[in-house]
Amino acid sequence: MGLTLSFTRQTKLTQAKITGMLALLKHHLPLRKGSPYLSPLLACGLLIIIGIGVGLLSGCQHTPTATKQEAARSKIVLNLATWGSAQELATLKPLLANFQARHPAIRVSLTHIPDYYYPKLHLLMAANQPPDVMLMGSDYLPVYAQTHQLKNLAGAQQLSRLGQAFYPNALKAFSWPRGSQTLYALPRDVSNLVLYYNADWFKRAGVPAPNAATTWQSVLAFGPKLLAANGVPQNSTAFALSFYRTPALYWLPFAYSWGGRGLAGVEQPQALLQDAQTREGLTFYRDLVHRYHLAPSRAQTGSTPMTDKFIAGELAMMINGRWSVPVLRQRAKFNWNVTTLPQGPSGSRVGIDSAGYAISRRTRHPDEALALAKFLTSAQASRAFSQSGLIIPARQAVAQSSAFLDPAQAPANNQAFLTAIETGVPTQTGAQWHRLSDALNRSLESFWSSDSGWSSDSGK
């Protein structure tokens, strides 16, 4: 299940609650074949397993001594839910120990949910067992804010003060309704895309490394030189650039950089895909595969992740986020660096997402929950997560310090991540974003696979 101690709580899943859970899942998540979310059968199985597991585990719990029972009752227990890799947990757990040492009356019970995070969060909420504090992505925030599951943590005055500490785009990402003077999570990090490149490959080709002034037109000019100088034939597994069809965050920069509209207010695929500038940008992106042969098709990559191809020396450049840094530091055997994405007709513009700590509106300990959320987004915590290479800190002072801009740690140009924040577009998703995202993927499936124009089905 991937869940730790919190699911051993005395949870009574009545038939009414189970019905409510399934209704919540069906309403908010696209439960269809091929979806990355839970199928109805898996959802039912998950409910049964949780119900059985709760009964078994609660029956097998060790009975503490009277002294331990008294000590446990004297503490306030805060339940914290998070996703994350083993490396992320290795950073988080010492921070939680530090918080508990500072607040001896509080014990933090950690629920680690490495996969199917939001469906499982839905189940906890439907069972009236929401975590007190939970890591929340800005793309999913509207689902919970609109249904009044989260506490609003700030008004206009507090936002003004927070705007001096955090990147404004990170704060905007946690407003609901979008653009309002609200804040439903304290930002931990900012997420965006940059261009990773194999510096040794460029050197062998005698091509200057890309930089902030690089345009997509110049990529078309030097891309073939990169391939030719490295002896790459047309049928090779090596390419100049990565290519992702999904999720949307990988192709949205081409819409933004060609002057296309953002996601604010978009509820149907046609509102986005029938925009002329968006179509132009997405056509250029697709042409990198079918017309210019600089990026791989699905048949040419199979199931191999782009990061693995980059590490294997099969990509000269890769579009990706900060999450690739730790694995590249460990596994890349060549010199690599990053820069902002090449410029389109409207500049270099990528989507800006954020992750932060939200508080359940139903928590019985709002003050203590807020203290935990503040600690996990403090300068101390931001430095710890930044030094691991995992995140772009949402705190401006930490982002501009050696904790993030460490010249001794690759990549040398960490500033590119911060520049991308300044020119980026906050991802203003709505409450039905993941239904829309699924619909966009279906609408674009045939488009990515051919070199023909836009079909009459595109955008429907």
Image (cartoon, rainbow, N blue to C red):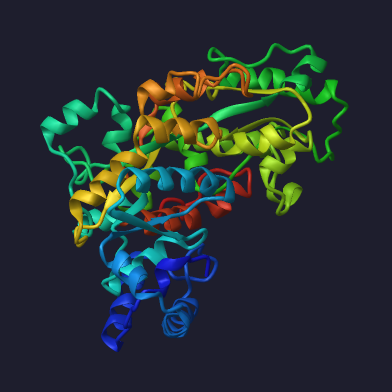
The residue lying furthest to the bottom in this view is: 15
Left or right: residue 254 compared with residue 180: right
- Image location of residue 9, percent across then percent down: 36, 74
Left or right: residue 151 compared with residue 216: left
Q: Residue at x 19, y 53 (%)?
A: 366
Q: Is residue 352 visible?
A: no
Image quadrant of residue 126?
A: bottom left
Q: Residue at x 28, y 42 (%)?
A: 174
Left or right: residue 366 compared with residue 315: left
Q: Nearer the viewer, residue 122 or 309?
A: 122
- Image location of residue 216, percent across then percent down: 57, 22
Residue 157, relative to residue 448: is it above or below?
above
- Image location of residue 153, percent across then percent down: 19, 44
Residue 28, relative to residue 13: is it above or below?
above
Q: Nearer the viewer, residue 443 or 302?
A: 302
| Quadrant of the rendering where the C terminus is positioned | bottom left
Q: Residue at x 37, y 29 (%)?
A: 379
Q: How many marks?
A: 0
The residue lying furthest to the front in this view is: 67
Image quadrant of residue 361?
A: bottom left
Residue 182, relative to residue 455: is it above or below?
above
Q: Is residue 459 visible?
A: yes
- Image location of residue 239, percent across then percent down: 75, 34
Q: Nearer the viewer, residue 414 or 38?
A: 414
